[in-house]
Amino acid sequence: MAFEYASLKVLEVLLRRQRAMSVEELRSDLARHGFRFAAGRLEDTLGRLRGQGLLETLVLAGLGQEALASVAITAKGERKVRGIVRF
């Protein structure tokens, strides 16, 4: 399975913070490191990582739409990052 470098960077940022972050905090932290995501692309990436069990997300639902409130790395995500970085 191919693992995008951008996805790895998302996991690294969350691992370094060791706490849940809002999507906007994550977006600005990634931008400081040169990773700028087009509209919707970060949310798609977070959805894929969540589907793999590497992230936990808090979703706010209301007024007919859903929005990600916060994102945190899971223990499985931490192992994945450490395994790739060690390689």
Image (cartoon, rainbow, N blue to C red):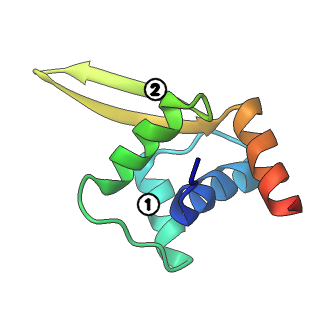
Label located before the other in sequence (2 or 1): 1
Residue to which mark 1 is pinned: 27
The residue located at (44%, 60%) in the rendering is 27
Say what secondary structure mark 1 lies in.
Answer: helix
Looking at the image, the residue that sits furthest to the front is 1
Q: Quadrant of residue 10?
A: bottom right
Name the residue nearer the viewer: 75 or 66. Answer: 75
Q: Amino acid at mark 1?
A: Arg
Q: Amino acid at mark 2?
A: Leu
Residue 42 percent coordinates (x, y): 37, 54
Residue to which mark 2 is pinned: 58
Residue 77, numbered circle: none
The residue located at (37%, 35%) in the rendering is 68
Q: Quadrant of residue 78?
A: top right
Residue 71 percent coordinates (x, y): 52, 38
Quadrant where the C terminus lies? bottom right
- Tell me whether the residue at label 2 lies in contact with that at label 1, contact meaning CB atoms closer than 8 angstroms: no
Residue 74 percent coordinates (x, y): 69, 32
Q: Tell whether 19 sits left or right of 61.
A: right
Q: How many marks?
A: 2
Q: Quadrant of residue 54?
A: top right
Q: Relative to 61, is 19 above or below?
A: below
The residue located at (48%, 29%) in the rendering is 51
Q: Relative to 65, is 18 above or below?
A: below
The residue located at (71%, 52%) in the rendering is 17
- The crowding category of the residue bearing disc 2, from other C-alpha atoms within 10 Å (few below 14, some 14 to 19, many at least 20), is few
Residue 1 percent coordinates (x, y): 59, 47
Q: Relative to 23, is 49 above or below?
A: above
Say what secondary structure mark 2 lies in.
Answer: strand
